[in-house]
């Protein structure tokens, strides 16, 4: 197998000023960790390659030491174009310190870019991002002052506004799989997702670049052709990492790879508290047979509630990383599922989402304002990025935002079917103007999209371009517990009602 080289040799193939596309998702999923580590180590020793542009559709890392944080050395990276940043705090810190050019675009758009580049199309033309911080009339996806070049444009087609993300050329593509066969074909038998590896490899190859694949095993035999995810004709070099882990927190879990099915009752239930209350109320928006997306953080509790209450198998949960069915996992390995039914290319999943395939989505909410705008991408010095939220929220038939009413220090008590606030959070989340518009209330109204905002003590709806309070938790005082902790005065429904009391029962 002449394509097999060491990780150190692979790192030496990357030159100054090149553009490198990197596969992977948070928690080490499909991440070519060894390649990233050796590239970072080479720079530390030799101060080359320098001034790279890195491109990744997903957030890559574990919030600690792997992922793009392996490359977080001043001078190595000039520009980072990513779909999400929260998994790589060291790289995010370089952005905040203006030591790199930082861009954040929707995860789906970045995935779709690979297909566009592979086919030599002009880029991605979509409505995704209109009226959000991606729109060049607002911020153009620029996450710091060093990001000066405009990488997205507003155009008009058929009398309608669209965003055009011009095509990007790739010099290097880094992908990962489980096994490389004797022809260099890559299979994914232990992987917990497929992601967009085949599109990435095609894009780098057709840009005239090279493709480096990291795998755990080599096989002297040909793989079953139906099992091949990345054909060997796209792959130039193969690096073997015998210690490659499925995720950052486990070597291999066959239930995440879809190779066995294990009981859902092995997944712990949520403890009673704000997160469970939000998840219980949000879950009231579920309908049998619904096709659903759950966002990272607070929304993933919806799946736990569905399992605990016995109707998980009546729903179709999906994750933007290409997972269909099963129970989405939360925390650091968000993006994979326990007992998935199918794994498709991430790009295809976003095509489905963009076309309105989702019945309902549940997304996180760092801030919301009186116009119904939501920020989940950047607050103060917290640089998270939008991930798949913009694709998902702009195109789902219904959107449910999930979050606590206040943040930092909130403590509650649930007793006798009533809610009490023991300690109020220090930070208001319902603000006059969000720091960054990840979700546009204006756009939602223009397409007549139903939008709910669920907290542990109150529920709001977007009506006529304004946030309207429609439900309040039992035990809460409207003035003292709700309005006093908001920076704007919401519309109050003439039919204001109490949230269902059984949400607050054991």
Image: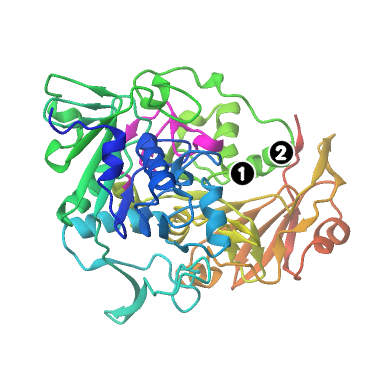
Which residue was labeled with disc 2? 503
Left or right of 273 on screen, residue 284? left
Q: Which mark is residue 226?
A: none
Quarter of the view holding residue 371: bottom right
Residue extending farthest to the front is: 46
User: Horizontal and vertical percent for residue 26?
Assistant: 47, 41
Residue bounds of the magenta highlight: 321-346
Quarter of the figure with the C terminus: top right
Q: Is residue 335 magenta?
A: yes
Nearer to us: label 1 or label 2: 1
Evaluate if marks 1 and 2 touch, with contact meaning CB atoms under 8 Å apart. Answer: no
Q: Residue at x 13, y 27 (%)?
A: 1
Left or right of 26 on screen, residue 349? left
In the depicted view, which residue is nearer to us: 15 or 328?
15
Is 404 located above or below residue 486 in the figure? above
For label 1, the crowd category at 10 Å Cα-Cα, with few meaning under 14, some 14 to 19 and many 20 or more, is: many
Is 196 located above or below residue 186 in the figure? below
User: Horizontal and vertical percent for residue 496?
Assistant: 74, 59
User: Horizontal and vertical percent for residue 60?
Assistant: 44, 44
Which residue was labeled with disc 1? 298
């Amino acid at each position: 197998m002449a394509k097999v080289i060491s990780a150190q040799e692979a790192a030496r193939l990357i030159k100054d000023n090149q553009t490198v596309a990197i596969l992977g998702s948070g928690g080490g999923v499909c991440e070519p960790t060894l390649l990233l580590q050796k590239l970072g180590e080479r720079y530390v020793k030799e101060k080359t390659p320098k001034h790279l542009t890195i491109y990744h559709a997903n957030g890559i890392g574990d919030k600690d030491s792997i992922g793009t944080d392996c490359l977080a050395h001043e001078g190595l990276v000039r520009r980072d174009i990513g779909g999400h940043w929260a998994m790589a705090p060291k790289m995010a810190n370089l952005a905040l310190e203006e030591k790199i050019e930082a861009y954040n675009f929707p995860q789906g758009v970045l995935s779709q870019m690979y297909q566009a580049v592979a086919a030599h199309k002009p880029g991605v033309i979509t409505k995704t991002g209109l009226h959000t911080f991606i729109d060049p009339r607002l911020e153009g996806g620029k996450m710091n002052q060093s990001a000066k070049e405009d990488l997205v444009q507003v155009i008009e087609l058929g009398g309608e506004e669209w965003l055009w993300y011009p095509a990007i050329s790739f010099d290097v593509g880094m992908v990962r799989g489980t096994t490389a066969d004797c022809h260099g074909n890559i299979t994914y038998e232990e992987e917990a997702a497929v992601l967009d590896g085949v599109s990435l490899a095609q894009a780098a190859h057709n840009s005239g670049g090279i493709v480096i694949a990291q795998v755990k095993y080599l096989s002297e035999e040909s793989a079953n052709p139906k099992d091949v995810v990345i054909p060997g004709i796209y792959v130039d070099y193969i690096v073997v990492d015998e210690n490659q882990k499925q995720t950052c927190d486990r070597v291999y879990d066959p239930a995440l790879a879809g190779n066995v099915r294990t009981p859902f009752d092995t997944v712990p239930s949520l403890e009673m508290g704000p997160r469970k209350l939000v998840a219980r109320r949000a879950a009231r928006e579920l309908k049998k047979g619904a096709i659903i997306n759950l966002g990272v953080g607070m929304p993933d509790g919806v799946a736990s509630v569905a399992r605990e209450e016995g109707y998980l198998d009546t729903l179709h949960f999906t994750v933007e990383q290409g997972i269909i069915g099963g129970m989405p996992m939360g925390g650091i390995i968000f993006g994979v599922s326990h007992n998935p039914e199918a794994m498709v290319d991430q790009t295809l999943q976003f095509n489905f989402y963009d076309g309105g395939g989702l019945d309902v989505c549940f997304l996180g909410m760092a801030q919301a304002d009186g116009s119904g705008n939501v920020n989940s991408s950047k607050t103060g010095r917290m640089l998270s990025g939008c991930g798949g939220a913009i694709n998902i929220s702009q195109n789902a038939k219904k959107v449910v935002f999930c979050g606590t009413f206040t943040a930092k220090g909130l403590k509650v008590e649930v007793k006798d079917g009533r809610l009490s606030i023991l300690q109020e959070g220090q930070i208001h989340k319902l603000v006059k103007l969000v720091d960054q518009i990840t979700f546009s209330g204006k756009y939602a109204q223009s397409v007549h999209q139903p939008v709910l905002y669920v907290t542990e003590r109150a529920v709001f709806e977007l009506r006529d371009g304004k946030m309207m309070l429609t439900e309040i938790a039992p035990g809460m005082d409207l003035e003292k517990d709700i309005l006093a902790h908001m920076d704007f005065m919401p519309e109050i429904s003439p039919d204001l009602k109490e949230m269902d009391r059984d949400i607050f029962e054991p």
